[in-house]
Amino acid sequence: MFVPGHLLPYGWNDTLSGTFGDYPADGREPGRVIRVDRGHCDVAAPAGLVRAHVGEHILCTGDWVTLHRLGDEIAVADLLPRRSAIVRSSASGRSEGQVLAANVDTVVIAAALDTALDLGRIERLLALAWESGAQPVVALTKSDTVQDISVATAEVAAVAPGATVLAVSADTGDGIDVLTAVIDGTVALIGPSGAGKSTLANALLGEDVLATGRVRDGDHKGRHTTAHRELLPLPGGGALIDTPGLRGVGMWDAADGIDKTFPEIEEFAAQCRFTDCSHVSEPGCAVLSAVERGELPERRLASYRKLIRENGWIASRTDTRLRAEREREWKSIARWQRQMYRSRGH
Ligand SMILES: Nc1nc2c(ncn2[C@@H]2O[C@H](COP(=O)(O)OP(=O)(O)OP(=O)(O)O)[C@@H](O)[C@H]2O)c(=O)[nH]1
Ligand SMILES: [Mg+2]
Ligand SMILES: [Zn+2]
């Protein structure tokens, strides 16, 4: 049987032994991407950490890969299919999504209690988390800064059906044991800058490995202290990915994730007169009447519609891009055909 050695603490599990079963035989070693820089990445490999060329792959932290030697260099040979991936519409506005982390089992969404709760942002991150295939957990951080955590916890729990919501303080240690108990496998921490992700990560890791930064005095906004996504082994098993604070999080092909975030709206929508009801002003809209009856908060419907609209817009933009690409392809085929005919005619 293949022994992963130093790779073991980086989220290795029995399934992977099977997946990688044949690779060591042909000289390729398994590895997990810890961090990606331009053209290179740090990879946990059986004999220890190595620096490898990424080749033509677009890798991200958490990817499982195989490595091979090229002279005295190490390069990534294969990128294994991702079991789950956190994807947002890329910041650069291109039509492809940006993968923030791969092969994640638990997404911890961090929201700080020392600032006003932004339920819309929590819902947005929940949609991203559900879409990734991982289990979301909402961690309300800095619980030591508020008198009563029960109100905020209940308010967030109401917008996070299916997800565990808990309050934690990295300062006092409150709630860290509960969080440790609910997280599983590879854990990714996401949320805005200054939410306390790296501080929480250090608490979970049991030592100060990651740099943290003070928030601004006035609005408690962070200063984007963390600059890289990085995978680290957790002392109790599993691994942790700390991520830089997200400025904007666009929906990327996240229709399922949005549905999972707003299950009650999906349920009401099943009763709408029109199957393609957009729940804006249609007659017989069961979602709007739920709002009227006070069974669905108007804010929640607005948040849902915002994400749906954005998701649809991204999808149509991608379609346009794909169509243009296909057209270009056809044009070059046509050009090639013309050349063929011409040369045959000669
Ligand atoms: N009072 C209190 N402050 C905390 C707690 N956790 C984090 N902080 C403070 O919040 C600030 C931001 O913490 P970071 O961990 O750097 O935040 P981050 O989410 O990693 O931010 P970025 O790396 O910029 O995305 C620091 O000054 C921390 O000391 C907590 O539990 N209680
Ligand atoms: Mg950080
Ligand atoms: Zn409707």
Image: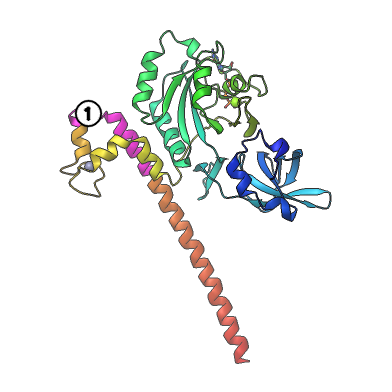
248 relative to 58, above or below: above
301 relative to 24, above or below: above
Viewer-proximal residue among 86 and 1: 1
Q: Is residue 58 magenta?
A: no
Q: Main secondary structure of the magenta part?
A: helix
Viewer-proximal residue among 144 and 326: 144
Q: Quadrant of residue 62?
A: top right
Identified at 57% across, 50% down, the residue is 81
Quarter of the rendered image showing ligand 1:
top right
Q: Which residue has dot 1 on it?
A: 295
- Residue 231 position, x and y percent, is 63, 33
- Residue 80 position, x and y percent, is 61, 50
Viewer-proximal residue among 107 and 338: 107
Q: Residue furthest bottom?
A: 346
Mark 1 CB in 8 Å range of ligand 3?
Answer: no
| Quarter occupied by the C terminus | bottom right
| Quarter occupied by the N terminus | top right
Q: Quadrant of residue 207?
A: top right
**Magenta region: which residues?**
292-310
57 relative to 134, above or below: below
| Colouring | rainbow
Q: Amino acid at mark 1?
A: Glu
- Residue 212 position, x and y percent, is 63, 21
Q: Residue furthest left?
A: 284
Residue 195 in sight in this render: no
Identified at 54% across, 44% down, the residue is 98
Q: Tag 1's secondary structure? A: loop
176 relative to 271, above or below: above
